[in-house]
Amino acid sequence: MLLATVIIAAGCLRAPAEEADLNFGYALDPFALASIPQYQAIVANDATMVTVENYMKWGLIHPNPSTYDFTLADQIVATAQANGQQVRGHVLVWHTQLPGWLTNGTWTRDSLLAVMEDHITTVVTHFRDNFPGVVTHWDVVNEAFNPDGSRRDTIFQQVIGDDYIEKAFAFARAADPDISLFYNDFYDDFSLAGETLLTGVPAGPGATPTQSDCAQLPKCAATQAMLTDFVARGVPIDGLGFQAHVLLGQAPDYVELADWVGPLGLEWAATELDVKVLSSLGDNSATRSAHADTFVSVLDDCLESDRCDTVILWGVGDAHSWLPGFTNGLFDYGLIYDDDYLPKLAVVKMFERLEAASVD
Ligand code: XIL
């Protein structure tokens, strides 16, 4: 038993994930990766694919108009390369974590398009050339819709207009013909316990945390319309990322939510999975059991779908989770390792589910 705990504490999910042909792993923090032995061991032994939680974002990687800083992103990508893992790039175009020079600048459609093209081309080609074959996927555009299905009022939307998204995909494809390009968003937490509490944005009509019918979620329906149009017009796109910051016990059925993705010839992925536990409920055997089941339900959906091959968790252990900070302490305990990098029940349950998949 002690041996089993020690083995699991250092990670055990990579081998069954590989057997199951699943890209599985974590969003990483370069400081934790450089300094915490348990974190390094878990990442090496659990993950087949990692992403970068923050340090590929525009404000961090492109702090001045003519300056790029790849130092911290490169550390993560180099570690992944040494570990024989792939990297999912996150994220090229998003409305937050932008540099001041961009948000405070004065732009025309053409000048902002030129800046966006420079940014996407420089970032994608940097990883293409310095780490050949390692960054295999990119989240090209993130969170472009409001809950009611209208476009989010970002600087790109305001200045460039609706076609900023397809332009971003075209720039990414021109920079690297071999990577998979994803639109990434969330469709599962508009509820009172989710986005309303976090941002004051009211829930979309018909939206509940467990809603799995895309047509009933205006934001999902708008995404479906956009991707259908992109495919019809040959805009280069390979898939849809569901962030999957889900609530305890309330993950949607992603197979159902994504049932229109395959017929378009696209893939889907769970790109930022964590399971939000109300802090007031605590981290105890009851919440750990429901927490494990919620993780397995999302994992199950991906394994069951012939259009999903990727599940990425938004962090390794609760010590580095974004949840308590982002939700003012309302939610915590979102990840599968605890504050001390010891495995929760979710690790055991996911191991069992992956093992079952690999003998299927
Ligand atoms: C979050 C990071 O986890 C935080 O550390 C940061 O302060 C804010 O961004 N959707 C996304 C991610 O696509 O990039 C966000 O990451 C979480 C929500």
Image: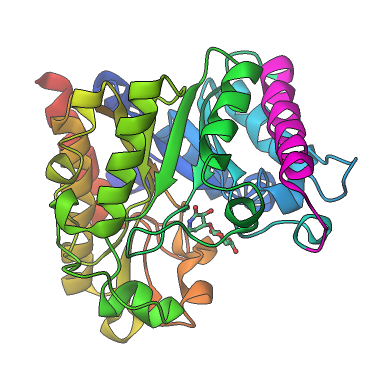
As drawn, is 54 to the left or to the right of 252? right
Q: Is residue 141 visible?
A: yes
Q: Nearer the viewer, residue 343 or 126?
A: 126
Q: Position of residue 152 (x, y in %)?
A: 49, 60
For this rendering, which residue is in front, 52 or 96? 96
Count up the numbered dots: 0
Residue shown at the point (76%, 28%) measured from the top left:
122
Please tell me which residue lies in front, 247 or 99.
99
Whether residue 1 can be seen here: no
- The percent position of residue 231, horizontal first and vertical second, equals 35, 24
Please say if 233 is above or below 34: above
Q: In this picture, is 138 found above or below 53?
A: above
Q: Residue at the location (33% across, 36% down)?
A: 269
Q: Where is residue 113, by image quadrant?
A: top right
Query: Viewed as shown, does residue 189 lie left or right of 296?
Result: right
Residue range corresponding to the magenta coloring: 104-130
Along the line of sight, the residue nearer the viewer: 194 or 120: 120
Residue 146 in the magenta stretch? The answer is no
Q: Residue at x 71, y 26 (%)?
A: 121
Task: From the image, give the main secondary structure of the stretch colored magenta.
Answer: helix
Q: Position of residue 174 (x, y in %)?
A: 62, 17
Is residue 259 depicted above or below 64 in this figure?
above
Quarter assignment of residue 92: top right
- Residue at x 37%, y 68% (from the top left corner): 333
Q: Name the residue at the bottom extreme.
A: 280
When the figure is inspected, residue 228 is found, relative to residue 103, above or below; the finding is above
Q: Position of residue 164 (x, y in %)?
A: 58, 41
